[in-house]
Image (cartoon, rainbow, N blue to C red):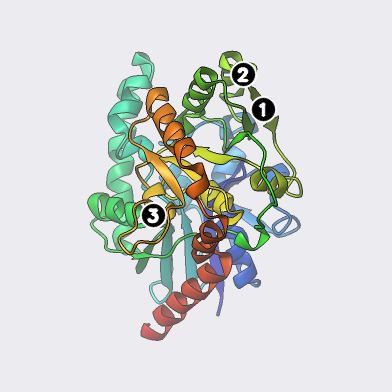
Amino acid sequence: MKVAIVHPWFLEGGGGEKVVDILVDMYPNADIFALSVDPAVLSARLRGRKICTSNLNSFLSFRLRLLRPIYLIPFLPFAVESIDVSKYDLVLSSCGPAVMGVNVNQDAVHISYVYSPQRAWWDLYAERRAQIPWILRGLYILGASFIRTWEFSAMQRVDHVISISNYIAHRVFKYFRRSSTVIYPPVDTSMGYIANQHDDYYLSVSRLDAGKRVDLLIHACNQLKRRLLIVGIGREEKRLKAIAGPTIKFLGRVPDADLPGIYANCRAFLFSSDEDFGIAPVEAQAFGRPVIAYGRGGSLETVRVGDAEGRSDTGVFFSEQTAESIIDGMRNFEAREDKFVPEEIQQHARQFDTSVFVQQFSKFVDSAMERK
């Protein structure tokens, strides 16, 4: 069986790239395709592997390839359709912008693993339109309308759709009218351990982008004068450092070998973004640490609060993306901090382990091939 794995681009490390790493382990003879690749950011698993790129890779300069997908709208469908996977029996699209539209052989099975319908031209379209300079706004409106129509049509040609969470399954049906199976993405919970004691700092692990709302965590910890360690880099780093008080420390990009100790010794993990799933909160729980999260999106599926079966909580939610709401959540946590049971938090995290993903995904693919 000839297998192709199609991913939008390898330009920064993220959850989608981690999924591709696991898929490559599962299908070691698969060929890998992407719209664009920066070799410097490839994981150890992918270094040395041949990755076939689209015409977008050579057409745009490296600097332009780092722009947000919103500026690449006119190019995406043409770049995807330049990828030739017509000789493959199984095509797995690691589905970010547009790649669900790759053209496959009529006898092939195409399974799309959807992280999220691209927010820039689906649910956050009005917000993004307002952010575009007025001189370019008309082009954005035309481009967004074109790619929404194109993606909807492309998704109808996919044989099977898998969503990374129930939250995303709902959005996939809303925008593409496709039902999907939910298989949570892989998280390496095996690295987790419970420390004998923890330190007094809160922790954030995230790309420093505007949508992650790390600024709210900084404002909250500034007001409460709580220690906050921030792991990650991104476009917002300079602005975030400018608003950070003396209790905030930026660690930048932390080596994988050092990250477990930072997780294991934190007081609690802070998470303020509306995520499609959210790998970092699961990683924190693998070390038995509670999570203080925005009560929306994937967090509602990965953090257990008020369980109907009476199982203990693994964190607390705050209701709004504001510093005041985060402060309320932190005070709520601190008022019952001794009620959280690290062993039970860790056990909860293990249902999202990589081994569970591999088992469920393999079973789904085998079933799809048998039905074919």
| Circle number at residue 10 | none
User: Residue at (50%, 50%) from the top-left corner?
Assistant: 340
Q: How many marks?
A: 3
Q: Where the N terminus falls, by quadrant?
A: bottom right
Q: Look at the numbered disc 2 and give the secondary structure of its residue.
A: helix
Question: In the image, residue 123 lies at what x, y percent?
Answer: 29, 38
**Residue 340 horizontal side relative to residue 318, left or right:** right
Q: Is residue 241 above or below residue 29?
A: above
Residue, disc 3 = 301
Q: Is residue 358 above or below residue 171?
A: below
User: Residue at (70%, 36%) from the top-left corner?
Assistant: 253
Q: Of residues 28 and 76, which is closer to you in this image?
A: 28
Amino acid tagged 1: Phe
Q: Look at the numbered disc 1 and give the secondary structure of its residue.
A: strand
User: Residue at (43%, 60%) from the top-left corner?
Assistant: 113
Mark 3 crowd level (few <14, some 14–19, many ≥20, 10 Å Cα): some
Whether pointer 2 and pointer 1 mark residues with C-beta atoms closer than 8 Å, the reply is yes
| Circle number at residue 241 | 2
Q: Of residues 281 and 193, which is closer to you in this image?
A: 193
Whether pointer 2 and pointer 3 mark residues with C-beta atoms closer than 8 Å, the reply is no
Q: CA distance from mark 1 to mark 3?
A: 29 Å
Mark 2 crowd level (few <14, some 14–19, many ≥20, 10 Å Cα): some
Mark 1 crowd level (few <14, some 14–19, many ≥20, 10 Å Cα): some
- Which of the 4 image quarters holds residue 240? top right
Q: Of residues 173 and 267, which is closer to you in this image?
A: 267
Q: Where the C terminus falls, by quadrant?
A: bottom left
Residue, disc 1 = 250
Q: Look at the numbered disc 3 and give the secondary structure of its residue.
A: helix
Q: Earlier in the sequence, mark 2 or mark 3?
A: 2
Question: In the image, residue 190 lies at what x, y percent?
Answer: 64, 63
As drawn, the residue found furthest toward the bottom would be 370
